[in-house]
Amino acid sequence: MADELEPLLDEYATWLRVERGLAANSLSAYRRDLQRYAGWLRATGHADPDTIDEAVVAAYVEWLKDARDDDGRPRYAPASIARALAAVRSFHRFCMEEGLLDSDPSDEVGSPRVPQGLPKALSEAEVEALLGAVPGDGARPQRDRAILETLYGGGLRISELVGLDLGDLDLHGGMARVLGKGAKERVVPLGRSARGALQEYLDAGRIELDRSRNRADRNALFLNARGGRLTRQGAWLIVRGAGDRAGLRGRLYPHVLRHSCATHMLDHGADIRVVQELLGHASLSTTQVYTKVSPERLRAVYEAAHPRAHASVPRGD
C-alpha cells in the first residue's frame, strides 16, 4: 500500500526542489507536513491515492484539530493546521496538474481560521533578564551570550543565526550579512552589546570549540560542542535554557527575541519601514502586525497620559 503513495511524494519533493527552487528550510517544512499526512493516510487505510476524496482530507484536518499532547493541550495551533493543509493542497494540485490523479480532493476543504493576534513579545525587563541568564566565562557561556545578543540585537530568525559564517560579520562596521527566507540576502546592524558578546566569543570561546575536522563547518560562526555548525534545534535549546533560568518558562518560542526586537524598536519610535528592512519582510503588512496596540499597553499609556485617569470622583452631598 505504501508503494502507491510514496512515488507521488518523491515526485512532488523533486518538483519543489527543482521547479520551484524552494530553500532547504521550506522544503523540510513541506516534507514534515506531508510525511505526517502520509502516515495518517496509511493508518486509516487510504494509502492508495485513488481512495482519497474530500471527506478523507476533511477528516485529516479534524484529526489535527483533535490531537492533544500529554497535558491535554492542542498539539497543533491553528496556524500549524493551516500550513499543513496548504501543503496537502499543493501536493494534490501537483498530482492533478501532472496527470497523476484525476481530481484534487482538497479543493473544497475549508482552512481553519487563524487568529490575527499580536506577537507575544517579552518586556524590555524580561529581555534583560534573559540576556543576563548565562553566567560563566567558558566557551559555551560565551557562545550562548553571543547567540542571545545577536538574535535580539539583529532581529534574526534562528535559522538565519545558525547559517551565519565568519565572513558574514563586520564587527568593526557593526553589520552582519544574513541569508533569509527565499535565499534573500540582507544586511543588518548589530548594536554595541551584540558586537561585544560576539567579539568575546570569537577571541576565546569559538577557538576552544573549533575542533571539527569537517571542512564544511570550519567557516560556521556558531559551533556546537563537537566543533560542527550549531543546528536550529541546538540554538533553540540554548534560548529555552536561558529562559528557564530567567523565570520565563512558558513565555518563550523560537522567534521571541526577533519579535521583541521589532516591538521594542517601534515602541521607541523607529520607522516601520526600517523595521521591515531589518526583519527582511517582503511585505510591509507583515511588519504592521507589530504596530497593533495590546490592551495592556493601551491601559498603561492611558493611565500615564490622561489627565483624568487618576482623578477622584466628587461625591454628592
Image: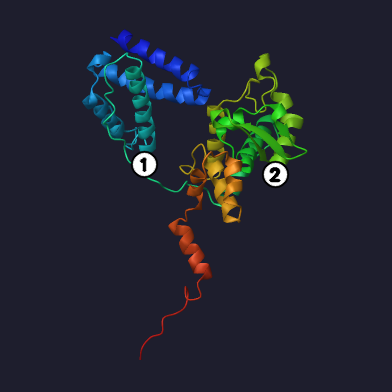
Q: Earlier in the sequence, mark 1 or mark 2?
A: 1
> In which quadrant is the C terminus drawn?
bottom left
Residue type at numbered disc 2: Ser
Residue 17: percent from the left, percent from the top?
A: 49, 18
Label 2 belongs to which residue? 193
Residue 35: percent from the left, percent from the top?
A: 38, 20
What residue is rendered at 48% in x and 45% in y? Answer: 285
Q: Residue 76 or 29: which is nearer the viewer?
A: 29
Label 1 belongs to which residue? 114
Residue type at numbered disc 1: Val
What residue is rendered at 45% in x and 26% in y? Answer: 29
Question: Which circle marks residue 85 in the picture?
Answer: none
Quadrant of the rendered structure where residue 201 is? top right
- Other residues around mark 2 within 10 Å, as few (<14) / some (14–19) / many (≥20): some
Left or right side of 184 for 58: left
Quadrant of the rendered structure where residue 216 is? top right
